[in-house]
Image: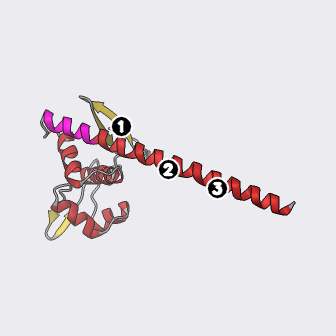
Amino acid sequence: MRNDNSPEIFARTDDDVFWVESPSDPTDGSGDESIYSIGDLARKFDVSLRTLRFYESRGLLSPSRQGHHRRYGRKDADRLTVVLKAKKLGFTLAEINEMISANDGEASRQTLKLSREKCLEQIAVFERKLAETEEALAELRWIYTSLSARIADDQN
C-alpha cells in the first residue's frame, strides 16, 4: 500500500484477483493511527451516520468503542473507501464483504474465483452501458446536425 497522501486509487493483482487499494490517512504525528468519530468519518466520506451504522451491522466496518462512542481507525477509513468504490462499480454489499474478506486472507480459493467472476460480470455490464451511451450520442449528434442544417436552410 502507498504511504503518500495522493488521492488516486490504484490496483494490484494477487492470484488473478484485482484489488482496489486506497491511500491511507497520515498518522497523528505520534505514530498512532488516525481516529475518527462517527461524525468525522461521515463528513470525510460525505455519507450519513445511518450509512455507517448500516455498514457496521453488515460487518463491513468494525469500529472500536469508548463507552457508547464509536472510534474508527485508518483500517475502517480504508475499508469504507473500498466499499464506496465497489458500490459505484455495481457490486452488492454481500459481494463487497466477500472481496474484503478475501483481501484480509479469510477467503477460500472458490470465493476468490467467484469474486473474479463477479468482476467480469460487472465489466460486461459497463461495456453494454458504454455501447448504449455511444449509440445514443451518435443519434443525438445526427439530430443536432439535422436541426442545424434546417436552421441554416431557413436562413437562406
The foreground one among 133 and 40 is 133
For marks 3 and 2, give the CA distance: 15 Å
Against 135, is 63 above or below?
below
The foreground one among 51 and 16 is 16
Q: Which mark is residue 133?
A: 2
Residue at 28% over, 50% down: 91
Task: State left or right for residue 67 relative to residue 34.
Answer: left
Amino acid beneath label 3: Ile
Helix or strand or loop: what does disc 3 sit on? helix
Quadrant of res 15: top left
The percent coordinates of residue 82 (x first, y second) are 30, 49
Helix or strand or loop: what does disc 2 sit on? helix
Residue that badge 1 annotates: 11
Residue at 27% over, 69% down: 49
Quadrant location of the N terminus? top left
Q: Earlier in the sequence, mark 1 or mark 2?
A: 1
Amino acid beneath label 2: Thr
Q: Nearer the viewer, mark 3 or mark 2?
A: 3
The foreground one among 153 and 17 is 153
For marks 1 and 2, give the CA distance: 26 Å
Q: Nearer the viewer, mark 3 or mark 1?
A: 3
Residue that badge 3 annotates: 143
Helix or strand or loop: what does disc 1 sit on? strand
Does the segment drawn in magenta span residue 52?
no
Q: Earlier in the sequence, mark 3 or mark 1?
A: 1
Crowd around label 3: few <14 · some 14–19 · many ≥20 (10 Å):
few
Span colored in magenta:
109-118
Against 123, is 91 above or below?
below
Does the segment drawn in magenta span residue 114?
yes
The percent coordinates of residue 103 (x first, y second) are 21, 40
